[in-house]
Amino acid sequence: MSLHPILAALRKHKAGVVLIALQIALTLAIVCNAVFIIYSRVEKVNRPTGIDESNLLLITQQWVGAPSMDTPAGVQQLDSMLRQDLDTLRRMPDVMSVSSITSLPLLNSSWVGGVSLTPGAQTPGKNDIHTAMYFGDDQMVGTLGLQMVEGRNFNASEITNKGMRDQTEPSIVIVTQDLAKRLFPHGSAVGKVVYFDGGNAPSTIIGVVKRMQTPAVGWGDNFTWYSTLMPTRINATFSRYIVRTRPGQLDAVAHHVATALYNSNPLRVIDDDDGIKRFSDIRADAYRADIGMAVLMGVVCLILLAVTAAGIVGLTSFWVGQRHRQIGVRRALGARKIDILHYFQLENLMIAGAGALIGIALAVGLNRLLMSKFEMDSMPVYYVLVGLAVVMLLGQVAVFVPARRASNVPPVVATRSV
Amino acid sequence: MFAYYLRLGWRSLRRNPLLTALMVFAIGVGVAASATTFAVFHAASGNPLPDKSAQLFVPQIDIWGPASRSAGRDLPDALSYPDAMALMRDHKAARQTAIYPMASTAIPQDPTREPFAVNGYAAYADFFPMFEAPFLYGNGWNASQDEAHAGVVVISRALNQQLFGGANSVGRTIRLDDHDYRVVGVLDEWNPRPRFYDVNNSDGFSDPPDFFVPFTRAIDLQTETNGNSNCYGSAGRDAGWKGWIQSDCVWVSFWAELPNRAAVTAYHDYLMAYASEQQRVGRFHWAPFVQLHDLMQWLDYEKVVPPETRISMLLSLGFLLVCLVNTVGLLLAKFMRRAAEIGVRRALGASRREIWLQYLAEALMIGVAGGVVGLVLTGVGMLGIGLVFDPDIARLARMSPSVIGLTLLTAVVTTLAAALYPTWRAARVQPAWQLKAN
């Protein structure tokens, strides 16, 4: 079939053609970017934190009338209260293991410091490496289900305690594999010495865990996998415990844990909302905005595609109605039904193709805009190509119904009302 | 005549219910998407203190030097304790206050009731008049009580309800942690959104604070900050509380009220002089660098409006644009299909203006219907925004009269804008040509 008659006919409907093409262009631009946003969010939400997330419970509580954490006597008193809690929790039924802890991946309450290969780096510069620190005891690695890839875990005799403001650095630490590689790109990190927060006291790396995300949500993207485990119970006016329960007993333990702690020491406050949290809740809170954004974008895409398809159906139906007699004439002159169908399909393909070309430019432009304003990544080319295929297909599906109706126009129409 | 056009429009729209429904729905969806995201955007980016925001300023001082910024950090968004105290002592602004958030345990006097967690702020006397906090009973404390490190407290209406059943509690005593405080004032409902004076510590949309105590008293009692503390390169400080408050760790928010331009300039000069002095005495090893943001600039600086809100606002505007283009196309199809009818009317003496008005009336009806559909969908959207945005922000976005008005107005205005070209085309139909064609 020659394209010439189609082009000639389109010239008579400039406005309609431009409108459909424009609509397809805008749809392509928005849908590509929206799908890319969905993909980025889903990818972010799905990445594992490195801990075994099932059956984990985090307890945060505040002491009432706590002694000072700045005097040695006060610190020891706080520590004995904390150890009493650990003991209480470990004796609860269905509890597998317990550790004191200062934060968790995705909790967004973090203790971030600098780590360096040289002592006394007072004013850190560009090469300063940030790391999120997790303070806990010898049960921390096991309770979190971290995977040791090198070296060994802390043992019970190596665990110390200190007041929250005490700046003493521990003599041994465990780091994540990513941090180990960053610090020691060549060879093993185990047995090597590092310095934290510009201090002069050396800390020896005794073990490397495969992966552990930092608590940061929405910031700190440059050190997401740089975590350090410290063999220290932190004594402060509040304390945190991580509890691993037997499979299926998470709810039962969550239900009884506050009572058990209050019974052992009533001088405390456990917040009703945030005091006892399942890890699944921590994850949901951390990624709520990301998941919501993905859902919103998905809904926007679907409605947008539907509106565009409806627009094509509407305008093509109008054209079919308008050319009713011409179609009859063509049929009378020997055109088959399939020829009429192909005519409208080809016409739509040309309009959609032109719109999609503009749409590609718009899609890339919108992506650039989002990159500059919202720290988004560059969209890979195949998004645009898939988007192109989708809108072309959408056009063909939308045009089919009116085109079918056109092909059913009987040749006899040509003979009427001349 | 216009009523007649409306009747004609109604008949025409009914003749083609599917196409009409499509247009109404497209407008409705586009408008609802925009209105919903706008409501969230508006809630998150509103001015919490419109009559005074231009007079309230946050100073920032470069205490870590350019090396810290090359490591990707900005100026610290709080002050260190020594700097905050120096600014309070110098008292160069009309009003000023240092602030930090604290978490405490309220211990009810009735021993049968369990202690519970409360949040509050340590602040200076100027805090209440500066931020126009409304009082239900009593007042804030005064400057001499700041100097006396007095054990006084201002409590929220909610805490007053919880502890005293809502009675006037001025003069009574409450126990926070291990210390007694005398109530000097009870605030009325007061929770500016965002809570601008604490956006460097929180997202600004969390639950309102329960109490306020004098800063000087909180420091005496060595009360921890419940907010961020940033200790860039201040390792090796002395141990304990003393080392903490003497350090270059930043954790104190600071606000100054500067009533006019001259005062702003003078305060900026003062900050520069302060930083130069610190350089002279050898504390800073770099050229003095300070910044002074007013309230709205500060909210922007602290990125209080979440990026999701802006992205979805942008995309929903694009969405509205597509719906608009769609409507233009459908209206054009609808109107041009009736070219013959227009030809007859024109031949019978109707002016172009009359035709134009007739079709505009029809478009207006679609716009209004689209607005109503949009309103319903906006209501659905409002229920769903808690899934997408921070629940603290989402609950601020409500079907307020302004949102309802905006939705309807947007629908009508966009439809009429979309109708401009199709109605113009309709009005330009040549009667002779149409009559001949039939």
Image (tube, coloured by chain):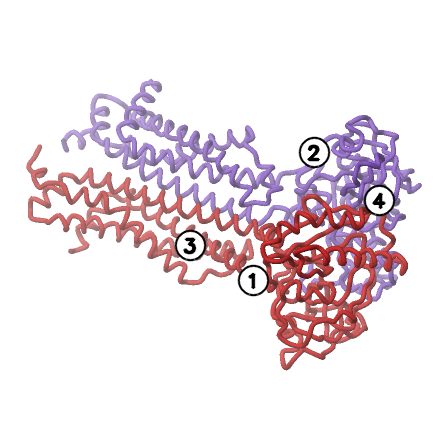
Query: Residue B15 or A21: which is nearer the viewer?
Result: B15
Q: Are marks 1 and 3 on the same chain?
A: yes
- Kindly identify the amino acid type of the residue bearing the numbered disc 3: Cys
Q: Which residue is tagged 3?
A: A32
- Kindly identify the amino acid type of the residue bearing the numbered disc 1: Pro
- Kindly identify the amino acid type of the residue bearing the numbered disc 4: Asp
Query: Residue A97 or A357: which is nearer the viewer?
Result: A97
x then y, percent, for residue B165: 78, 28
Chain coloured purple here:
B
x then y, percent, for residue B303: 63, 49
Residue A293 in sight from this viewpoint: yes
Horizontally, is B245 left or right of A229 in the view? right
Query: Which residue sits furthest front?
Result: A93
Q: Are marks 2 and 3 on the same chain?
A: no
Q: Which residue is tagged 4?
A: B177
Q: Secondary structure at mark 4?
A: loop
Which quadrant holds the C terminus of chain B? top left
Q: Is residue A394 above or below residue B63?
A: above
Chain coloured red here:
A
How much space separates mark 2 and mark 4, taking CA atoms?
A: 37 Å
Horizontally, is B265 left or right of A378 in the view? right
Using the rendered view, name the quadrant where residue B168 is placed: top right
Q: Are marks 2 and 1 on the same chain?
A: no
Q: Count residues near mark 4 (Cα–Cα under 10 Å), then give few for <14, some for 14-19, many for 20+.
A: some
Label ID, residue B51: 2
Q: Are marks 1 and 4 in contact (CB under 8 Å)?
A: no
